Image (spheres, helix red, strand yellow):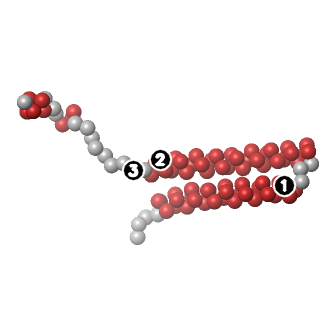
Amino acid sequence: MAESMTSGLQAKDLPVVTTYDPMPAREEARRRIAYSLMGLLYLTFLGTSVLIVRFKLAPETIREMFTALVGLTGTMLGFYFGGQATQQRPPG
């Protein structure tokens, strides 16, 4: 009975099994995070520039906002580009 069910199968009908490579998905996630943080840094800079001109915002407030955001953005960009450099380096 089982022989009659499989007798019509050919090699082209069988599924191709490949191993999963997480690197493309990981790189896409890192890229999105890095671009999002750079965009957030740009919008924060633009927004604080408007606040400085329009409302005379205190320099201490600006310094606190930028210190945390620049640190976070720099860390993420370093992680992103450091991960790329490690992957591109030949073994040895």
**Other residues around mark 2 within 10 Å, as few (<14) / some (14–19) / many (≥20):** few
Residue at 45% from the left image edge and 52% from the top image edge: 23
Please state which amino acid type lies under the numbered disc 3: Asp
Helix, strand or loop at mark 2: helix
In the picture, measured across the screen, residue 28 lies left or right of residue 49, that is: left
- Residue 17, given in percent of the width and then of the height, sits at 28, 44
Please state which amino acid type lies under the numbered disc 1: Thr
Helix, strand or loop at mark 1: helix
Determine which residue is flagged by label 1.
61
Distance from the alpha carbon under mark 3 to that under mark 2 = 8 Å
Q: Say if residue 7 shows up in the picture.
A: no
Residue at 49% from the left image edge and 50% from the top image edge: 26
> Which numbered disc, 1 or 3, marks the residue that appears first in the sequence?
3
Residue nearer the viewer, 30 or 4: 4
Residue nearer the viewer, 58 or 75: 58
Residue nearer the viewer, 17 or 81: 17
- Residue 88, given in percent of the width and then of the height, sits at 47, 59
Name the mark nearer the viewer: 2 or 1: 1
Determine which residue is flagged by label 3.
21
- Residue 66, given in percent of the width and then of the height, sits at 77, 55
- Residue 79, given in percent of the width and then of the height, sits at 57, 59
* Image mark for residue 25: 2
Helix, strand or loop at mark 3: loop
Name the mark nearer the viewer: 1 or 3: 1
Pointers 2 and 1 in contact (C-beta within 8 Å): no
Please state which amino acid type lies under the numbered disc 2: Ala
**Other residues around mark 1 within 10 Å, as few (<14) / some (14–19) / many (≥20):** few
> Which numbered disc, 2 or 1, marks the residue that appears first in the sequence?
2
**Other residues around mark 3 within 10 Å, as few (<14) / some (14–19) / many (≥20):** few
